[in-house]
Image (cartoon, rainbow, N blue to C red):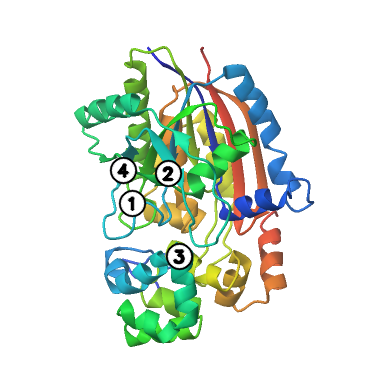
């Protein structure tokens, strides 16, 4: 579980600040390239080569390989950019939410519904 | 002088684009959201705007993290849309109003809002979806001026700063010599969080207080820091900063023309409000 600090005061939350932006630059730049369909296809065709081209570090490469969103965030990924990566695999935001919270997709949807009170 | 006839503030979740593309407006999941909009369209038919100043945040289409303006404004004659990574259908370009854009730039910089000016800009779902909800035929009967707020990379502009930007936009529009009718739109929110162990966070109580404050106490949210707003509304709920700009562009006294609130669409508590100046 994440812990809070003065810089990251919200539990379970990584505010995307300058430190994250510096750490995640290569990863987010790769994800930004996925705006272009040809780049999404190039990634699928040669994932290793594509990640190498963007200079991902070992931690980022591993998190991409594992499609692990919490690890991607820890490695500096920004949610808006990671959403483009998730799109390659046709994952929607409930899939992503379920993965990060350790719930099934149905359980995650139920959690959202419960917010109606 | 040009006249701000009201504001529309709404959520802008990408999945709305998927729902529009698939024609799911009457689907039970989507209906409570889409049903909020016929009334907005009736209002638009009544107030007949010529121009929309649309305040939103870019999600990595026009701006990457290589250059991240806190506030940016479009100054183009046309704004296209493009693939954001999901291959959704794109919409036809929007007609800009570069003369008004430059008038806003002159006025806002004179008021010490040092915006980044963009003579080329593509607009993403946070711009196109609210427009498509207001004009489903996507024929865009208005000219547009996009205003972009950084809600992506901290430090974000404060809610107070965003509110003041809206107030300055109102003064700039009032000093424009034309007689156009202007609607200010603010998109994003309300509470939602896509990332982290806290993903799926929604705060109905806060959202309803915030929506009430838009009518009765417009500076209410300025008492919170942006980190506090993240805590209260989620990492993406902080997009409500765009609502603060739109609200700032209206006078203190407003009349609520319409509102809708629904949990959830995608991971988001969706909010919608139409406000008018209390005195027209």
Name which quarter of the figure residue B53 lies in. top left
Measured Cα–Cα span from mark 3 to mark 4? 20 Å
- The residue that mark 3 highlights is A79
How far apart are the alpha carbons under marks 4 and 1? 10 Å
| Count of number-bearing discs | 4
Label 1 environment density (alpha carbons within 10 Å; few <14, some 14–19, many ≥20): many
At numbered mark 1, what does the secondary structure look like: helix, strand or loop? loop
Q: Mark 1 or mark 4, which is nearer the start of the sequence?
A: 4
* Disc 3 and disc 4 on one polypeptide chain: no
Q: Helix, strand or loop at disc 4?
A: strand
Alpha carbon distance from label 3 to label 1: 16 Å
Which chain's residue wears label 1?
B
How far apart marks 3 and 2 lie (CA) works out to 18 Å
Q: Secondary structure at mark 3?
A: helix
**Residue B241: assigned label:** 2
According to the picture, the residue beneath numbered tag 1 turns out to be B156
> Are the two marked residues, 2 and 4, in contact with CB atoms closer than 8 angstroms?
no
Tag 4 residue: B71
Horizontal side of B19 relative to B226 (left or right) equals right
Residue A2 visible in the snapshot: no
Q: Is residue A73 above or below residue B172?
A: below
Badge 1 and badge 2 both on one subunit: yes
> Contact (CB < 8 A) between labels 1 and 2?
yes
* Within-10-Å neighbours for mark 4: few <14, some 14–19, many 20+: many
């Amino acid at each position: 579980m994440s812990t809070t600090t003065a810089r990251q005061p919200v539990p379970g939350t990584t505010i995307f600040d300058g430190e994250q932006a510096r750490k995640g630059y290569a990863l987010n730049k790769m994800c930004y390239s996925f705006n272009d369909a040809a780049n999404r296809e190039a990634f699928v065709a040669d994932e290793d080569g594509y990640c190498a081209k963007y200079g991902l570090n070992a931690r980022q490469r591993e998190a991409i390989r594992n499609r692990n969103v919490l690890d991607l965030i820890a490695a500096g990924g920004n949610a808006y950019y990671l959403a483009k990566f998730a799109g390659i695999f046709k994952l929607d935001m409930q899939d992503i939410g379920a993965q990060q919270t350790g719930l099934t997709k149905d359980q995650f949807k139920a959690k959202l519904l419960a917010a109606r009170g | 002088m040009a006249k701000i006839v009201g504001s529309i503030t709404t959520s802008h979740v990408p999945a709305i684009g998927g729902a529009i593309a698939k024609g799911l407006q009457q689907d039970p999941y989507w209906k409570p959201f889409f049903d909020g909009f016929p009334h907005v369209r009736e209002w638009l038919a009544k107030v007949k705007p010529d121009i929309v100043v649309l305040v939103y945040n870019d999600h990595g289409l026009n701006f990457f993290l290589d250059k991240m303006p806190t506030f940016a404004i479009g100054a183009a004659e046309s704004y296209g849309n493009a693939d954001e990574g999901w291959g959704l259908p794109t919409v036809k370009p929007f007609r800009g109003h570069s003369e008004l854009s430059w008038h806003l730039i002159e006025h806002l910089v004179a008021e010490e809002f040092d915006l980044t000016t963009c003579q080329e800009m593509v607009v993403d779902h946070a711009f196109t979806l609210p427009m498509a909800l207001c004009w489903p035929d996507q024929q865009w009967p208005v000219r547009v001026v996009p205003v972009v707020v950084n809600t992506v990379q901290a430090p974000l502009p404060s809610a107070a700063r965003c509110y003041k930007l809206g107030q300055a936009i109102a003064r700039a529009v009032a000093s424009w010599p034309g007689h156009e009718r202007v609607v200010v739109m603010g998109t994003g929110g309300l509470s939602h969080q896509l990332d982290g162990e806290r993903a799926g966070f929604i705060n109905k109580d806060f959202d309803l207080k915030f929506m009430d404050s838009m009518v009765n106490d417009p500076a209410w949210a300025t008492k919170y820091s942006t980190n506090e707003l993240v805590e209260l509304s989620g990492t993406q709920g902080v997009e409500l900063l765009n609502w603060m700009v739109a609200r700032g562009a209206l006078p203190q006294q407003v009349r609520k023309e319409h509102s809708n609130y629904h949990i959830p669409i995608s991971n988001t508590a969706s909010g919608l409000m139409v406000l008018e100046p209390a005195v027209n």
